[in-house]
Amino acid sequence: MSDAVDWDLAARRAGRLARPGPTAERDELSALVASLRTGAARAPEFVGTVTALPEAAERAAKGPVYVIDRPRWSEGNLGMLRHLVGDLMPAPKGPGGPRFAAEELGALLSLLSSRVLGQYDPFTPPSAGPDVGGRVVGGAGRLVLVAPNILHVQRQLNLRAADFHLWVCLHEQTHALQFAAAPWLAEHLRTQVRDLLATLLVEDDAATRMRDLLGALPRVLRGDAEPATASSGGALLGAVLTDAEQEAMDASIAIMSLLEGHADVVMDAVGPRVVPTVRTIRKSFEARRSGQGFVDTVLRRVLGLDAKLAQYREGAKFVRAVVAKVGHPGLNAVWSAPERLPTAAEIADPDVWVRRVHG
């Protein structure tokens, strides 16, 4: 059976379309990579202290860290996507189908590749491709730092380099800790994502779904669609989901809201003793997240980035509310079993989760 996507072509297309990153002298680039690696090595200890999960932090610290460029980020995410759901994608209708899908996917990833600072990938198996140093990017549970994007934001917001690098690493190493504390979590998420996409990618409905998406596009760009929330999945996708699909989406996004909100809270909780300019970084970064330029607005609405932003904010509210009542040790019940994860309703009302789990 042929792949639905020409994956190699998608990687080449994403690499060619990726916008060039900021220019820098070799010494500055070397210092950037060294600082990011230092931040990644230091972060787990601080994350473990804040979360009261030192053993999980130790396990997280053993995972591989890759400092890469934009094309390699796209390549890595294509590998993750292929591994995660490649077998669920509908078979190509004709000889040009995989190529067309590759062109679209490559173009999409090229847009996103300039926006991501870091990423923790708990899904990809070994041997997923080389990083910019020529080494193999492999091993489930890998932390990726996109050097040109970090440098761009650092310069754009005039941030202190070492503080910003550590701050980014604190967020991503919190994700590593989450999956180390809950060894079942990656497979649980993988199953949820695959179950949802199995319904979204039903071959007989693919053409109708595409027409619905295209029909919803003008409303999304005008802002006429429902505002994005953490559980909406983004205005464009939310416009074509059935009730059952939306319910499944809600369950998955509730988990993502927890993960992102938890990481946001922890990265700030480490505090100015470790990251002296943390308050300045957060204030500047929140203003950047809420940017309203035309291109930024289009990308956020069409690609669901408004919903991603809602995940950070609503998830952080949940985490702060739970920690205020039962502390980080009480919050850590979420990592003990799938049934302890918050529902979408509980993300919106943390007291319900506290009563259900802690009585």
Image (spheres, rainbow, N blue to C red):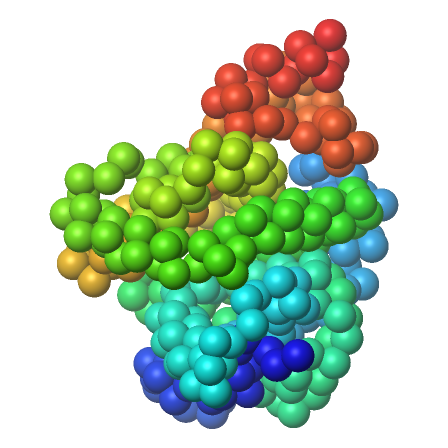
Q: Is residue 174 above or below residue 146?
A: above
Q: Is residue 155 above or below residue 34?
A: above
Q: Nearer the viewer, residue 356 or 58?
A: 356
Query: Is residue 10 shown left or right of residue 256?
Result: left
Query: Is residue 259 shown left or right of residue 93?
Result: right
Q: Residue 258: x percent and y percent?
A: 58, 36
| Residue positioned 74% across, 13% down in the render | 358
Q: Residue 205: x percent and y percent?
A: 45, 54
| Residue positioned 56% across, 49% down in the render | 199
Image quarter of residue 77: bottom right
Image quarter of residue 43: bottom right
Residue 27 appears in the figure:
yes
Query: Is residue 343 shown left or right of residue 115?
Result: right
Q: Quadrant of the N terminus?
A: bottom right
| Residue positioned 38% across, 70% down in the render | 108
| Residue positioned 79% across, 32% down in the render | 337
Q: Nearer the viewer, residue 276 or 293?
A: 293
Q: Nearer the viewer, residue 126 or 25?
A: 126
Q: Residue 294: x percent and y percent?
A: 16, 58
Most distant residue in the front direction: 204
Q: Report the label total.
A: 0
Residue 52 appears in the figure:
no
Image quarter of residue 263: top right
Query: Is residue 36 shown left or right of residue 305?
Result: right
Q: Quadrant of the C terminus?
A: top right
Q: Residue 241: x percent and y percent?
A: 42, 42
